[in-house]
Image: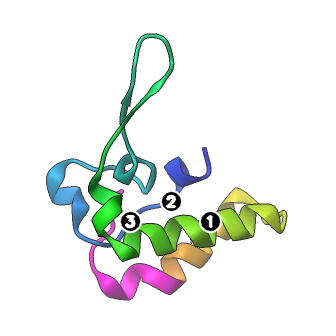
Amino acid sequence: DALKNVPCYCGCGSIGHTSNLSCYVKEFGADGKPVFDTHALGCSLCVDIAQDVMKMTGEGKSPSAIHQAILDTYSKYGPANQ
């Protein structure tokens, strides 16, 4: 859920991504299992954002604080996909 609430700034909105989560997961099947997207395998910006989100989540930061920190840190790299 944490990755679903933050944007990505690598330009992947042009391929339909709507959050950092969609850099990793294309969709969830009827059984609830994720269908993975390989985009983030070749994108260090996607990975950096996910790692920052994981770190801040582990530190107990609120979703709104995490969202703002991602905006503050990564918005300089390009348009948000949210």
Q: Residue at x 28, y 67 (%)?
A: 42
Horizontal and vertical percent position of residue 10? 28, 72
User: What's the residue type where badge 1 is placed?
Assistant: Val
Q: Secondary structure at mark 3?
A: loop
- The reply to whether the magenta stretch includes residue 79 is yes
User: What's the residue type where badge 3 is placed?
Assistant: Cys
Q: Quadrant of the C terminus?
A: bottom left
Q: Residues within 10 Å of mark 3 (few under 14, many from 20)?
A: many
Q: Residues within 10 Å of mark 2 (few under 14, many from 20)?
A: many
Residue identifier under label 2: 6
Q: Is residue 41 visible?
A: yes
Which quarter of the figure has residue 81?
Answer: bottom left
Q: Residue at x 79, y 63 (%)?
A: 58
Residue identifier under label 1: 53
Q: Nearer the viewer, residue 51 or 63?
A: 51
Write the start and end of the magenta stretch as one range: 73-82
Q: Residue at x 49, y 76 (%)?
A: 71
Q: Residues within 10 Å of mark 1 (few under 14, many from 20)?
A: many
Which quarter of the figure has residue 40?
Answer: bottom left
Residue identifier under label 3: 8
- Residue at the top extreme, as displayed: 30
